[in-house]
Image (cartoon, grey):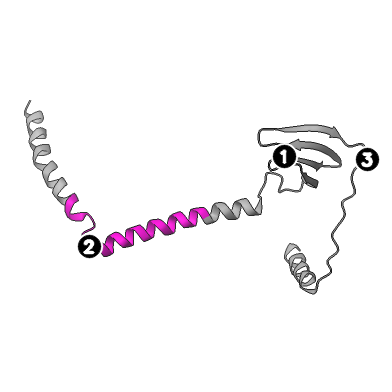
Amino acid sequence: MLIRTSLSLVFSISLPVAAEEAMTKAPSSQVELLSWIMSLAVVLVTIFVCAWVLKKTRLSQFAGGQAKVVANLALGTRERVMVVEVGEQQYLIGVTAQSINLLDKLEQPLVVQTNKVTSQFAKQLQGMLSKNEK
């Protein structure tokens, strides 16, 4: 009984004191409020930039080199037909927003054609990229 009374006395005294301290710790000037808003904006922009970079680099679960897209044909805004190579075998698949369907297993694999680089800038860029891969 004595403990309960003392706890209720402590809480009744400490709650108004805690509320008053919280009010004094709130941003009191416009500069502090502006600094808080700008910090929040920087964090949100950083999150969106990171998401955009990840989307553009198209990091996938096949980054280890076990599977790769050989050919890709867009049929609509969200529909595609793709030839995917897994190991030595190639598969023709249909890709929509809702599903991925195996259309056929290719008996004769498609030959991957490399694009010939013709402009001077593209040649230099390709040379720099090949140096980074080694």
Depth check, mark 3 against mark 1: the one in front is 1
Q: Is residue 89 left or right of residue 121?
A: right
Residue 7 location, x and y as percent?
Answer: 11, 34
Residue at screen point 16% across, 46% down: 19
Q: Secondary structure at mark 1?
A: loop
- Of residue 79 and residue 9, the one placed in the foreground of this image is 79
Query: Which label is found at residue 108?
Result: 3
Q: Residue 8: which quarter of the image?
A: top left
For the view shown, which residue lies furthest in the right direction?
Answer: 108
The amino acid beneath tag 3 is: Gln
* Mark 3–mark 2 distance (CA, rounded to whole Å): 73 Å
Q: Secondary structure at mark 3?
A: loop
Residue 131 location, x and y as percent?
Answer: 76, 67
The amino acid beneath tag 2 is: Ser
Q: Is residue 106 above or below residue 116?
A: above
Please tell me how crowded label 1 is: few (under 14), some (14-19), or many (20+) other residues with Cα within 10 Å: some
The residue at which mark 1 appears reads as 79
